[in-house]
Image: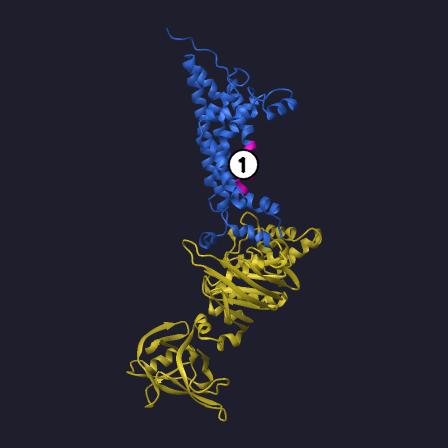
Amino acid sequence: MIDARLVKRFFAGPESESFELNVHLQAEAGITVLFGASGAGKSLTLNCVAGFARPDQGRILVGGDLYFDAAAGVHLSPQRRRCGYIFQDHALFPHMTVRENLRFAAAAAGRNRLRGLQRHRRINELLEIFQLSELAARRPAQLSGGQQQRAALARILVADPRALLLDEPVRGLDLHLRQAFYDVLRDTRERLKVPILLVTHDLEECFELADSICVIHRGRFLQCGPREQVLSRPVSAEAARTLGAFNILPAEIAALDPARNSSKLRVFGREIEGPYLPAHLIGDQGFLCVRESEMHISQCKHENGMALRLLAAQPSSRGVRLRLEHDVYAIISAAGYESVRGAACLEVDIPPSAIWFVAK
Amino acid sequence: MTPIPQAIDWFPLWLSLRVAALATLFVLIVGTFLAFMLSHREFRGKNVLDALITLPLVLPPTVLGYYLLVLLGRPSPFGRFYEYVTGQPLVFTWEAAVVAACLHSTPIYVKAARAILEGIDYRYEWAAFSLGASEWRTFWHVTLPLARRGLVSLAALAFARSLGDFGVTIMLAGNIPGRTQTLSVAIYNAVESGNGHVARVLVLVISLIALALLWSAGYAVKGGTNGRFLPPASRARGGA
């Protein structure tokens, strides 16, 4: 597993603001996604673990080995860390064939590790696993995007890495190639019981791949945890905002009823029903977080329902995304949209189970 | 009365080619090392080193020649050491012309080679490091092959430039026909002594050689971008 406490500061320059990375990253075997906007410090975290950047303070342990300790002055070179690093464009050596790329990795991995026939066998085995045997004599430029990804992964696995670090490996690739890469990566996760750190700002990728997620914003982790928890139970409005796809509505607790496991939340002057909120008091101010896809929309029926005007409707990959008053968004199916199209007023219904309240 | 055309002494041409070849070899090794240090390492005095390497480009050849005479002349420590080892002084020998040619071609080689090495996507080197490759292995198997075409064309340029040194050569190696008289010095000599025929022929020869070298250098560079040798198509997209 990876246990890294990192502090790294950058002072303001003529064209850059000051920036501080201050995170405590813990990753078990499996895929840990570092999720955040660009410039949040995701890649920097990866570079610190790989040894390409030196933190000002902190300590990095990978699989029980000390890679970095500011206090003790330990800073292993990238060569000795053996972290498989996949770059955005794979960085396969363009002047070598696929097989030569793998052979380079095997030779680089160390004198006494893999020799002669054994090395040859290992390379063939990996070419086989990643369906590259036929393509072994080709140069990277002669491979398709998906084949390049597989070759990059195979090259890394030759060296028997202690951890895998992936920096937006599918950015700029089309959906079909992404899916193929996700499959290969899931496969690799099963085969290789090491921590895999994946940097992305694509929410879909979190859903597809993550075992756990760290939400990073301006150099700090807002939330780290298992995927389901992070995706549905953000710890703060900021975490929800960074994840995106959430409506974050200012709310006040109007009533709490532990006996019936319910509460009443005042949102935009209306009261709506929610689940009981432990550790909160009546009158608490905060935010109601609800996924855009979990909003129920219908034509106005009830007098005291939450009625919002429709401002815009945009087709999206999962149906239609509605923009309502007060910056409220809802994703509904195309059929659902047909039934409310043209309605003067829309009623928003939020199922209690979808409601998640965070204090201010 | 027209002067009778003399038989042309071709020694200066052969000497110049030999001097330029040795100087190019020196520049390829030392210049590539310097360019690598400047492009890949941070160290104290880097800017000073950079300025020192560039200095020969801007100083008058007489000044450079004077410095070298002081540094390498017979009374200097290096001059005495050289004489002790080889049994002859360095100045006013054809070897001194090699020194002069190196000084003439090193600055532009290092400048351009540094730009080439800096232009190589750092991710290839990082990828090699993270696979466990030492810096030496990475340099030989990744950095150098990726820079090869550019450096080869630069070597052609360095060779052409080594052919052309005049000022420092004449100060340091002198103008001894049959021993230290290089092509450019011989042309000067021919013009000075009113020997227009020799001058014309030698000028034509050195121009043609230079043109051929530059053409081949340009060809090598163009060859470097004809797709096959380029990194994956994603390189253009990836940015720096």
Q: In what quadrant of the picture does the N terminus of chain B appear?
A: top left
B33 part of magenta stretch: yes
Please name the residue shown 51% across and 34% down the image.
B155
Q: Which residues are magenta?
A: B25-37
Color encoding of the figure = by chain
| Chain A: colour as depicted | yellow
Q: Position of residue B65 (x, y in %)?
A: 49, 24
Name the residue carrying label 1: B31
Please state which of residues A301 and A75 is positioned toward the viewer in this rendering.
A75
Pinpoint the chain carrying mark 1.
Answer: B
Q: Nearer the viewer, residue B188 or A68?
A: A68
Q: Residue furthest top?
A: B1
Main SS of residues in magenta: helix
Q: Position of residue B236 (x, y in %)?
A: 45, 52
Expressed as whole percent of the image width and height from the top left, the position of residue A158 reads: 63, 57
Tell me if residue A72 is in the magenta stretch. Answer: no
Relative to B161, residue A233 above or below: below
Decide which of A11, B156 is in the foreground and name it. A11
What's the amino acid at mark 1? Gly
Examine the image and state in which quarter residue A267 appears: bottom left
Vertical comparison of A248 with A52: above or below = below
Residue B140: horizontal and vertical position, in percent?
Answer: 59, 44
Secondary structure beneath label 1 = helix
Q: Is residue A120 above or below residue B72?
A: below
Q: Residue at x 50, y 15 (%)?
A: B9
